[in-house]
């Protein structure tokens, strides 16, 4: 579909500049998309796209994220290249949500990846990674044909300090993510409060130069008098 400009207005339909297709049925590539700016400083902007239902042998529904690098500019490569990131964990649904923000002010954006079903101690509490911009900038872009056959790079590669987990089973922590300044907001629409299920919460964390500060600086709670409100 497309927006209707109205009678007498100019309708402009641009040609597709770039297209990246999923590689398997029901991977749900494109569930989330976020711009990253120019990660590798080649003059072309890059973006990330999530595929939360992606499988690899032995790890169903682990999900994943692809960094798609810009191309075609004066100093850019002539063809599309990608890098793949994944949790290497079963049923985490990584890539359900994405955000990007330059938390440390170094000019390179960090990537935020929500995995609303990530399991801790075999309980589906959800989790969120912040992938440092320096880590992203050091990835080696490859052609799609080569990258899709290679093992994806682990989201845990920067260390556990860049991961924050939910507190309750089935809370869907990581359902939504947003970031600004030094702060990361994580939504958990099925979280509970005072034993009341499904009220939902948003937790706000500070992101420091060495990782996510695990204690939230603020928590916004849904209305407990409306169970199932799912803030």
Image: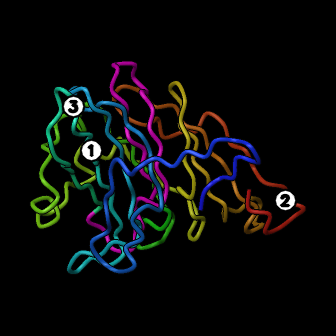
Tell me the crowding category of disc 2: few under 14, some 14 to 19, or many 20 or more residues within 10 angstroms, Cα based: some
Marks 2 and 3, how far apart at CA: 46 Å
Q: Which mark is residue 224?
A: 2
Marks 3 and 1, how far apart at CA: 22 Å
Question: How many callouts does the rendering have?
Answer: 3
Q: Which of pointers 2 and 3 lies earlier in the amino acid sequence?
A: 3
* Label 3 residue SS: loop
**Mark 2 or mark 3, whichever is nearer to me:** 3
Where does label 1 land, which residue? 159
Where does label 3 land, which residue? 40
Give the residue at x 56% y 69%: 169
Query: Going by the image, does 181 lie left or right of 86?
Result: right
Q: Is residue 98 magenta?
A: yes
Q: Is residue 121 visible?
A: no
Give the residue at x 58% y 41%: 185
Query: Going by the image, does 147 lie left or right of 120?
Result: left
Q: Is residue 80 visible?
A: yes
Give the residue at x 16% y 46%: 79
Residue 226 % position (x, y): 87, 64
Tell me the crowding category of disc 1: few under 14, some 14 to 19, or many 20 or more residues within 10 angstroms, Cα based: few
């Amino acid at each position: 579909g497309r927006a209707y400009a109205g009678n007498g207005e100019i309708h402009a339909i641009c040609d597709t500049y770039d297209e990246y297709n999923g590689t398997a049925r029901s991977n749900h590539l494109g569930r989330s998309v976020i711009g990253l700016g120019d990660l590798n400083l080649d003059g072309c902007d890059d973006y990330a796209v999530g595929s939360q239902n992606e499988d690899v042998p032995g790890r169903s529904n682990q999900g994943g994220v692809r960094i798609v690098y810009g191309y075609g500019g004066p100093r850019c490569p002539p063809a599309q290249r990608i890098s793949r990131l994944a949790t290497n964990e079963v049923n985490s649904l990584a890539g359900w949500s994405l955000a990007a923000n330059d938390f440390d002010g170094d000019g390179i954006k960090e990537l935020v990846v929500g995995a609303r079903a990530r399991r801790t101690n075999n309980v589906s509490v959800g989790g969120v990674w912040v992938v440092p911009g320096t880590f992203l900038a050091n990835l080696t872009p490859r052609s799609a044909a080569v990258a899709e056959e290679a093992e994806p790079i682990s989201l845990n590669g920067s260390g556990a300090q860049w991961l924050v987990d939910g507190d309750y089973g089935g809370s869907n922590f990581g359902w939504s993510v947003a970031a600004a300044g030094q702060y990361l907001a994580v939504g958990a629409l099925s979280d509970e409060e005072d034993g009341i299920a499904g009220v939902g919460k948003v937790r706000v964390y500070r992101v420091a130069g060495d990782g996510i500060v695990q204690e939230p600086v603020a928590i916004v709670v849904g209305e407990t008098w409306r169970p199932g409100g799912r803030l």
